[in-house]
Amino acid sequence: MKLNTLSAACLSTLFAMPVMAEEMDHSNMDHSKMNHAQMGHEGMAQHDHSSRADSHAPIGVMGDHTHNEGEWMLSYRYMTMSMTDTLDGTKKVSDDEVLAGFMVAPKSMTMQMHMFGAMYAPSNALTVGFMLPYIENDMKLVMEMPMMGSGMAMPMTMRTNFETQSKGIGDLKAVALYSLFANDTARVHLNMGLSLPTGSIDEKDATAMSGGQDIILPYPMQLGSGTYDVMPGITYNGTQDSYSYGAQLNAVLRTFTNERDYRLGNRYQAQAWAAVPIAQFMSLSIRGDYEQWGNIVGEDSDLNPMMVPTARKDLRAGKQFSTAVGVNFLLPAGNRIALEYEVPVYQDLDGPQLAADPMFTLGWQLVL
Ligand SMILES: [Cu+2]
């Protein structure tokens, strides 16, 4: 008897579940209150689309959305980027060509970044937050040396491969997003950020010519800028029933010089994206991203600019256009997972300089 009632209860639960799921699907399309309550992110006060996977921009975009008063968001991003080609302008150059001008040629670099973030909205107009990266850099290089005592008319050379590494926390970024305009289909906010020099610019490692001693590593192997950097920006988000889109302009403006007597070049970025929700819990996106950055001002006097191109302050600038495809998943209990794959399609670098390969970003966000 007891068993029967129990199994009947189980059965009804089983049958009820698919029905519930179907109802959820429909109600989500209608932006129901239930879903706002369950998954509501930016929703009610400002607009009516928070239950959509594409209410956040592709994960490679920072500071894309504001929050409603009292909301918290925790986030984690994992980014992995490698560089294997060397460019001078838009032209690919070989190790031999680099070694004609320098003792050492960078062959490749990988950078992995774990980015931890939190956001909080003290009001509907203002969202504040911080982001702290943990960075791991790895560079492979080749050194060319004349062979000692070869005594020939044509000097023989010997090449040695070696690798340098650096890792640690990067620069802490404090951000404030201020909503300028918001209605059902459009939102605009200002991005104001300050990057604090918490990342090391004293990273050292042994190289093929340091005789086992740790020496200061070139600019791209350092973990921070060493300066206080101002990061202004503006973001637009548009939402229609069957798609959404957005655009963002931002800059990283370095101030003064760091403790090693230089500052990195300023960075400017313009990007635009579009997304379609293909299910209640999932959206697909495309994004175009233009970035431009300058050379170093001042210099680290412990670096030898004749040794390797990465120690040259005037071989750091570049321009890049890349395209990205992404997917956002909206999961229960305020969780979101997103992936994005970004492919550089145009790079113009003051070189020889290592050029970016395709880049991958995985992100998790939790809205509380
Ligand atoms: Cu957020």
Image: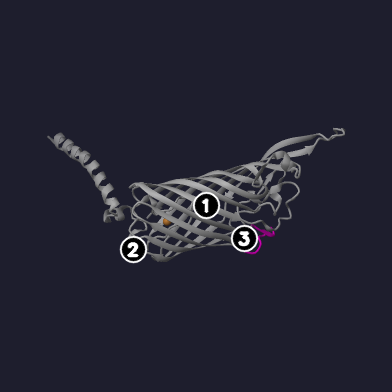
Mark number, residue 148: none
The reply to whether residue 351 is visible in this rendering is: yes
Residue under numbered circle 2:
45
- Give the position of the N terminus as an image quadrant: top left
Residue 280 is left or right of residue 203, and the answer is left
Give the quarter of the image for residue 148.
top right
Ligand 1: which quarter?
Answer: bottom left
For the residues labelled 2 and 1, the Cα–Cα distance comes to 31 Å
Looking at the image, is mark 2 or mark 3 nearer the viewer? 2
What is the magenta range?
255-264
Looking at the image, is mark 2 or mark 1 nearer the viewer? 1
Residue 257 is left or right of residue 366, and the answer is right
- Callout 1: SS: strand
314 in the magenta segment: no
* Callout 2 crowding tier (Cα within 10 Å): few <14, some 14–19, many ≥20: few
Residue at left 44%, top 60%? 236
Mark 1 or 3 closer to N-term? 3
Residue under numbered circle 1:
289
Mark 2 or 3 closer to N-term? 2
In the image, residue 128 lies at what x, y percent?
45, 62
Looking at the image, is mark 1 or mark 3 nearer the viewer? 1
Residue under numbered circle 3:
227
Depth check: 123 or 242 in front?
242
Q: Amino acid at mark 1?
A: Asp
